[in-house]
Image: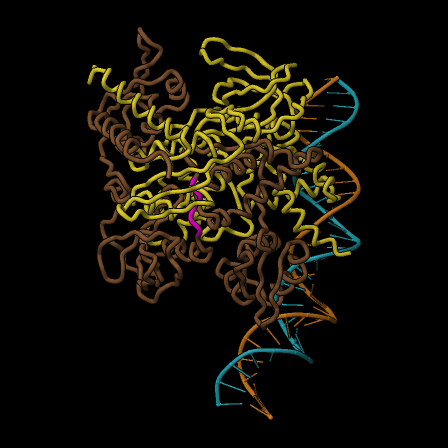
Chain colours: A yellow, B brown, C orange, D cyan
Amino acid sequence: MSESRDTLFRFLTMLQLIPRYPGRISTPVLLEKLRERGFIIDNRSLQRDLRGRISQYFPLSCDDSKKPYRWFFDRDYHCNLPALDVPSALTLVLAEEYLKGLLPPVVIGQLTPHLQSARQLLDEVQRNGLSQWAKRVRAIPNGKALIPARLGEVIWQTVAQALLEQRALDVTYLSRSREEHKIFTLHPQGLVSRHSVTYLLATVNDFEDIRQFALQRIEAADFSDTPWQESTGFNLDEYIRGGAFGYPQNTDDVRLIAHVEPQVAWLLTVTPLAEEQTLTPFPDSDWQRLEAVVPDDQQTLWWLRGMGASVTVIEPKAWRDDMRATAEKILAQLDQEPVSS
Amino acid sequence: MSESRDTLFRFLTMLQLIPRYPGRISTPVLLEKLRERGFIIDNRSLQRDLRGRISQYFPLSCDDSKKPYRWFFDRDYHCNLPALDVPSALTLVLAEEYLKGLLPPVVIGQLTPHLQSARQLLDEVQRNGLSQWAKRVRAIPNGKALIPARLGEVIWQTVAQALLEQRALDVTYLSRSREEHKIFTLHPQGLVSRHSVTYLLATVNDFEDIRQFALQRIEAADFSDTPWQESTGFNLDEYIRGGAFGYPQNTDDVRLIAHVEPQVAWLLTVTPLAEEQTLTPFPDSDWQRLEAVVPDDQQTLWWLRGMGASVTVIEPKAWRDDMRATAEKILAQLDQEPVSS
DNA sequence: CCGGGTAGCGACGATTCTTGTCGCATCATT
DNA sequence: AATGATGCGACAAGAATCGTCGCTACCCGG
């Protein structure tokens, strides 16, 4: 039996098993995990591999302050197999540009190793012009970029893990009034990132009903000894549609009819509102008639409002009325308020 | 000299040098690249490694239809070193949810291997509940999710590479009127992804001025023999601020003063509009007074419009006037148009 | 049609590396 | 203080690596 082929593969497995810095793994545990994966290996060999071989060629460090030594990679070390190609690296950088306004910094930090290897590749491609690429790529987000909520790194990691491994959490939560610290046991059922705020959906203690918890208001989170309870019949999509995050969204789509400015019409030919969409020019003006089947949700309404006077809603009537009411109310308020204070 | 340590590292280097499927690399070229990196290795050894060792343990295929054999990985193969942890995998999935509405499908496809390894990890975490995680994570985007523009995979890859490697492109471009096919030589200077449309900024032929080209209107792109010309003094940020993508944006920020509904006030405490922002309650109502230093751009104005009657702009006067004018114009248009057609 | 050049591959043997074992030192824990 | 766990140097048997040689197959140009 040529066992040697195992060697290469065993090394790769080891490299995958050793975590990045905040994490660490002790030699015996690593040995155990390798055994689980079918690598019958001597304790001594493992030690030799770690110290003599791998750590010479990888940013691998060892915490030898206590006796079962613990090994870990440098915080930002990352390696892709196969290596990134240029278009993928560019995609990653572009994705980061967008995500900066959408996810808490800590969550993006989770991607740092990936992003760094992308940046590194791009740097190498442009040996001459120093980091030109950073000046050549921009993302302009769709809506107003709010500043994402601050959030502790450990909180995010704990919550993510609890959600996925189906474990209960003991949390200290700062209630909305900013006054009370409350301690709950949560049974995570889902996670929703909305605009720039991330919410955990969970049942509390022994109750059955789902509640929302903004992640940035969780002050401490630990895995609980209480067994996790699944909320039977919970369906995230239905929950969102039910209106938990704003405007109640009907399951049925609606037929939108509107008159739009030429500029908006042009925009819509490039990025349609919906799969089913028609634009027909008017004979007597350069505006166009838009007809589209769109979801009946807050986002669509926002989009229409954001277009301002460039779009005139004809149908559905409810939206037409909403636009009128909103415009009238704005005027009333503007008239009422003094110009300055 | 123990040379063996080289072996492991050489394998890793090989794994990095072999591209994913659409790409391929021939044995002699691979040999050359390994030599460049200091691995003095015999031709025979390389052949043995590829056929005998690596391809046994990796999804590596070989195109042996022609004589310099060409090697490549399966299209979706990907391996992270060190392996992803659960929170990072969740972050990737969440990022994908957001990006689906922001980047053309092809561009996201570029990330498929990464995303797949994330999904795979999550699947493994939840052995019992079959792929529960997919039902437990959602992103609700900030604005209306338009359908991203369609775009050819090869076009994206070619453009990305040309931009970063500073090469000129010969493109066939479908001009805005959808009538004419034009052939240009472009000298890429920058890339801007705006909402869901991606634009290449480039000078054309021998001209000096920068023009925008929507990627989805590029029908064919090839590297040009013409040497790339840098547009001296071009600065992407200045260009965007100059108003090339809509509302001209002044460098100076403005001081926004507005009265906001309690609900909006609450939203703003969680995700502020800007670093400098104050909210002060009014004594005689539950509305609050918002004061913030915000950029003078289209996005901010959109955000204000999207809020409808929940926000009353006090300052700057230009915006207040804009809100009033927009509201009046909407009313006028609604009155003018028949209710239905 | 034919030959030179290139690439793949089997075989082989010397070199080199790998790996289990043993013994000892060190550290942690009780 | 004792016991068990862990780290590590040394060693030798066994295994794998790697360059070389020779053969074959294929591509191309003459």
Q: Where is residue B30 in the image (x, y as percent from the top left)?
A: 53, 63
Please identify the quarter of the rendering in which residue B18 is found.
bottom right
**Front-lying residue, B68 or B112:** B112
Looking at the figure, which quarter contains the N terminus of chain B? bottom right
Residue span colored magenta:
B146-150
Task: State left or right for residue B338 relative to residue A240.
Answer: left
Looking at the figure, which quarter contains the C terminus of chain B? top left
Number of numbered callouts drawn: 0
Is A302 in the magenta?
Answer: no
Looking at the image, the residue that sits furthest to the top is B283
Q: Where is residue A117 in the image (x, y as percent from the top left)?
A: 47, 45
Vertical order, A172 against A306 (above or below): above
**Front-lying residue, C26 or B318:** B318
Name which residue lies at 24% across and 26% down. B324
Please identify the quarter of the rendering in which residue A16 is found.
top right
Please identify the quarter of the rendering in which residue A178 is found.
top left
